[in-house]
Image (spheres, rainbow, N blue to C red):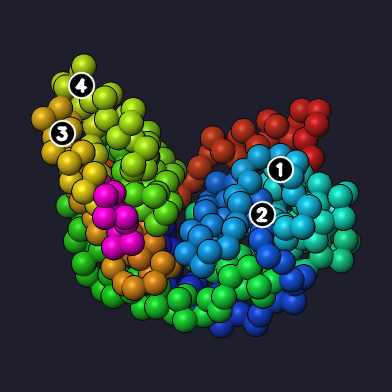
Amino acid sequence: MSEMRDLIATLPTQLRWAADLDRPRVPPAKSAVVAGMGGSGIAGDVAAVVAESESTRVTVHKSYGLPSWVRDELVVAVSHSGNTEETLSGARAAVAAGIPWVAVATGGRLLEDADASGAARVDIPFSPQPRAAFGYLAGGVLRVLEASGVVGDQTGALREAADVVEGALAGPAHEAASEIADRLAGRVAVVYGGSGVGAVAANRWKTQINENGKTPAYWSALPELDHNEIVGWSAHPELGRESIGVVFLHDAGDHPRIALRARLTRELITPTTTVAADVSSLGVGVLARLFSLTIVGDLVSVGLAERAGIDPAPVAVIEDLKKRLATQPGGST
Ligand code: PA5
């Protein structure tokens, strides 16, 4: 049993921590930009789906600085370490432009910058890896957005998500993940979701398989993939059948035509690739449905690491790259 497998099982605890968090004191706003990268930045993707479901707008920014149009939005800078240069650059752009911002981090320069500039901060409990703090980071960002008025009360939704994930972790998610990992082992995973919940979940599956499974993986969303990627399965059927495993993620919130497209796309690509699994979301609310899909992907990713005989936790190449960047001119950390 790997440490990462144990960390993944803490997701319900993390979601309940976020539900119990005292509502942070942050400036009111109608819309927000969440700046963050990798295992932290996906908290913004979760927030964007929640906001969309409430007919408000959260834009996710995964680069340096801020989008040029940002004026009246609340900027939420989220970084597990608090030291990610792109995220620090976004926070510093907000300070320079006098745009209200909030830091969500375990420590680092981001929290120091928040204190120095008088911005609000949400301190997240530390996890050994950012991607293992998914519930803390997404929940913390959501509670900030709730406090600013960009989204409504998230406490009930976070609790439902915790309950649904806990139920999945009691057995079904492990069983499903073990079968899927058997089918994906030694293959490149391609994960397809619908727009919204399915797309964010597919992205999380991909990054978890990359980082925990140390394996290439890719994701796409319907309906867009029906307008290009679907053609890519034609010319090299041996490649698709022997080296790739496609996973379809289904969500009750999918547009009916997207659900239909998933079924038809599956039928059309089956002769030329290996369809490894179909996974359907559980629960009622957006968060429960989203985390019910990601928890299976998280378990698949550690299952792949275990089958390859590797420790899922370390991401040495990311750390090496960050060190190399820090020694070069222009690093903001
Ligand atoms: O999984 C990882 O380690 C990365 O994707 C990090 O989350 C990413 O590099 C950003 O770092 P941080 O989460 O500390 O802002």
Pick the quarter of the image with the C terminus.
Answer: top right
In the structure shown, which secondary structural element does the residue marked by tag 3 occupy? helix
Residue on which the image places disc 4: 234
**Looking at the image, residue 319 lies above or below residue 41:** above
Q: Which residue is drawn at the image coordinates 52% and 54% (left, top)?
A: 45
Q: Which residues are magenta?
A: 248-258
Mark 4 and mark 3: Cα distance apart in space? 10 Å
Mark 1 and mark 2: Cα distance apart in space? 9 Å
Q: Amino acid at mark 4?
A: Ser
Decide which of 142, 226 is in the foreground and name it.
226
Q: Amino acid at mark 2?
A: Val
In the structure shown, which secondary structural element does the residue marked by tag 1 occupy? loop
Q: Is residue 79 magenta?
A: no
Q: Is residue 101 left or right of residue 161?
A: right
Mark 3 and mark 1: Cα distance apart in space? 39 Å
Residue 78's spot in the image, x, y percent? 65, 57
Residue on which the image places disc 2: 33
**Looking at the image, residue 9 lies above or below residue 193:** below
Residue on which the image places disc 1: 67
Residue 228's spot in the image, x, y percent? 34, 28
In the structure shown, which secondary structural element does the residue marked by tag 2 occupy? strand
Please report whichever mark, 3 or 1, sits nearer to the chain's N-terminal start. Answer: 1
Decide which of 227, 142 is in the foreground and name it.
227
The answer to whether mark 2 and mark 4 are in CB contact below 8 A is: no
Residue 22 occupies which quadrant of the picture? bottom right
Please report whichever mark, 2 or 3, sits nearer to the chain's N-terminal start. Answer: 2
Q: Is residue 298 visible?
A: no
